[in-house]
Image: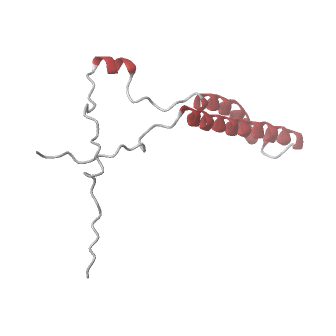
Amino acid sequence: MKRQAYQPILITDASRSQDDQLSSRQKRYVLMMGIRVACVIVGAILVGAKAPLLWLWLPLCGVGMVLIPWLAVLLANDRPPKEQHRLAARFQPDRRDETPPMSLTAEERPHKVIDVEP
């Protein structure tokens, strides 16, 4: 009788927890909104100082003030994709392997053999 090889259960492929996902999205949102605030401040300084090429810098700051909040909200609400769609899972048969990984007893586990020469 051929014995199946021992396959340990790996958690490296596990998805990140919802708390970790939420905190990373919150940090990204705060960073992007900080960039927006910087665009507002730079725009105000440029207008007050009557900087050269004001016609170029103000539209760039304006685009940053309008585009960055929109992107920040989109990215803050973004979640990683699910493995399968819920309805697709209903109509397709489950393709997972039904046999759990084998667990070896202490006697069955491979032992390291140490050769000691007299």
- Residue shown at 28% from the left, 36% from the top: 100
Q: Residue furthest right?
A: 48
Query: Could you say where residue 8 lies in the image, as x and y percent from the top left?
Result: 33, 46
- Residue shown at 23% from the left, 48% from the top: 5
Name the one closer to the observer, 63 or 84. 84
Q: Is residue 5 left or right of residue 39?
A: left
Query: Could you say where residue 116 lies in the image, as x and y percent from the top left?
Result: 28, 76
Name the one closer to the observer, 95 or 76. 95
Would you place residue 36 above or below residue 88 in this image? below
Q: Residue furthest bottom?
A: 118
Q: Is residue 13 left or right of residue 77?
A: left
Query: Could you say where residue 54 lies in the image, as x and y percent from the top left?
Result: 79, 41
Residue 55: in sight, yes or no?
no
- Residue shown at 28% from the left, 31% from the top: 96
Q: Is residue 23 left or right of residue 33?
A: left
Q: Quadrant of residue 49?
A: top right
Q: Residue furthest front?
A: 118
- Colour scheme used in the picture? secondary structure
Query: Could you say where residue 60 lies in the image, as x and y percent from the top left?
Result: 70, 38
> From the image, which quarter does the N terminus lie in?
top left
- Residue shown at 37% from the left, 26% from the top: 84
Q: Quadrant of residue 64?
A: top right
> From the image, which quarter does the C terminus lie in?
bottom left
Residue 70: in sight, yes or no?
yes
